[in-house]
């Protein structure tokens, strides 16, 4: 592509971006980051700071920085992405809300839980109002906020919200859907944190049984992310019960 069309042809730059994404998926984060940085530099120079393709390149590079553990750099860049998208597209555009969710996740990774929770709550409010209570993106936003509430030690609120996520996914997707099983596992973790060990063990075993019998849950399945590993350990008097789900 470079030889046929030149270093700065849009198709060459898109091909570089695609290669960088694949390298990232392979776990080759340093190589991916180097190419994504180059893509961003080219798009800035050729298209300008506020072109959608430049902002997309910035968001992609920020994600890889986060994956590398360079959280301060990632957060700074994601904040810039959010500011640009807000200004260009407005507060309630789907891309603005997605950028807000992405930035909130990095704030959580940095341990800035109050800021992350506040932003995730805003994302949830917007998605509820714009998309409705049962849209997948709304339920995902609810799940993300619940996780942060749990990280803050607000276990009762987290458990209530995770239970609502599970109820919605059960009703909309069914018991055996990967997202439903993931919600079971997520709620069980909070139940353990609350000391509700019997409830956690029961839910964990049920999740495991659903996973075992679901036709789509074979070795090639993808459960929300590329893989899921979940362990709940329950100690009762002298016995220990462990349920592990691994894909």
Image (tube, grey):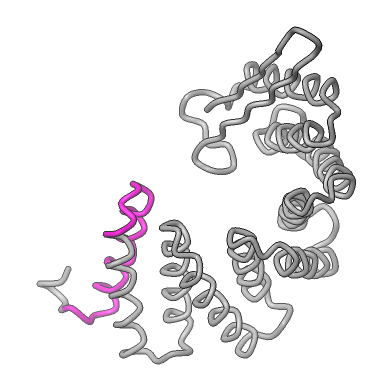
**Count of picture labels:** 0
At horizontal 70% and vertical 65% (from top left) the residue drawn is 116
Q: Which residues are magenta?
A: 7-31
Q: Nearer the viewer, residue 164 or 114?
A: 114
The structure residue drawn at horizontal position 76% and vertical position 56%, both measured from the top left corner, is 145
- In this view, the residue in front, 72 or 144, is 72
Residue 5 occupies quadrant: bottom left
The image shows residue 123 at horizontal and vertical percentages of: 75, 67
Looking at the image, residue 27 lies above or below residue 56: above
| Residue 214 point in image, percent of width and height | 64, 22
Farthest residue, direction left = 3
Give the left or right position of residue 2, taking residue 146 as reference: left
Is residue 15 a member of the stretch shown in magenta?
A: yes
Looking at the picture, tell me which residue is in the foreground, 177 or 147. 147
Horizontal side, residue 9 vs residue 101: left or right: left
Residue 129 spot, x, y in % from top left: 85, 68
Q: Quadrant of residue 162?
A: top right
In the image, is 176 to the left or to the right of 35? Answer: right
201 shown above or below 182: above
- The quadrant of the rendering that contains the N terminus is bottom left
Q: Nearer the viewer, residue 30 or 129?
A: 30
């Amino acid at each position: 592509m470079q030889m046929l069309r030149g270093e700065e042809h849009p198709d060459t730059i898109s091909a570089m971006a695609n290669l960088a994404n694949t390298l990232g998926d392979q776990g080759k984060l340093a190589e991916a980051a180097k190419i994504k940085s180059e893509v961003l530099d080219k798009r800035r120079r050729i298209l300008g700071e506020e072109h959608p393709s430049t902002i997309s390149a910035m968001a992609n590079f920020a994600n890889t920085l986060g994956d590398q553990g360079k959280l301060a750099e990632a957060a700074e860049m994601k904040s810039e992405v959010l500011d640009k998208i807000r200004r260009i597209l407005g507060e309630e555009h789907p891309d603005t809300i997605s950028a807000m969710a992405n930035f909130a996740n990095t704030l959580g990774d940095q341990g800035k839980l109050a800021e992350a929770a506040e932003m995730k709550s805003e994302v949830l409010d917007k998605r509820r109002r714009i998309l409705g209570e049962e849209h997948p993106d709304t339920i995902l936003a609810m799940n993300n906020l619940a996780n942060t509430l749990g990280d803050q030690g607000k276990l009762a609120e987290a458990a209530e919200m995770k239970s609502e996520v599970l109820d919605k996914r059960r009703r909309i997707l069914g018991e055996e859907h990967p997202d439903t099983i993931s919600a079971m596992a997520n709620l069980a973790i909070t139940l353990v944190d609350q000391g509700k060990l019997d409830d956690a063990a029961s839910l964990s075993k049920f999740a495991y049984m659903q996973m075992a019998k679901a036709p789509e849950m074979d070795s090639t399945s993808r459960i929300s992310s590329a893989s899921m590993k979940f362990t709940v350990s329950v100690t009762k008097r002298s016995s220990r019960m462990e349920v592990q789900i691994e894909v």
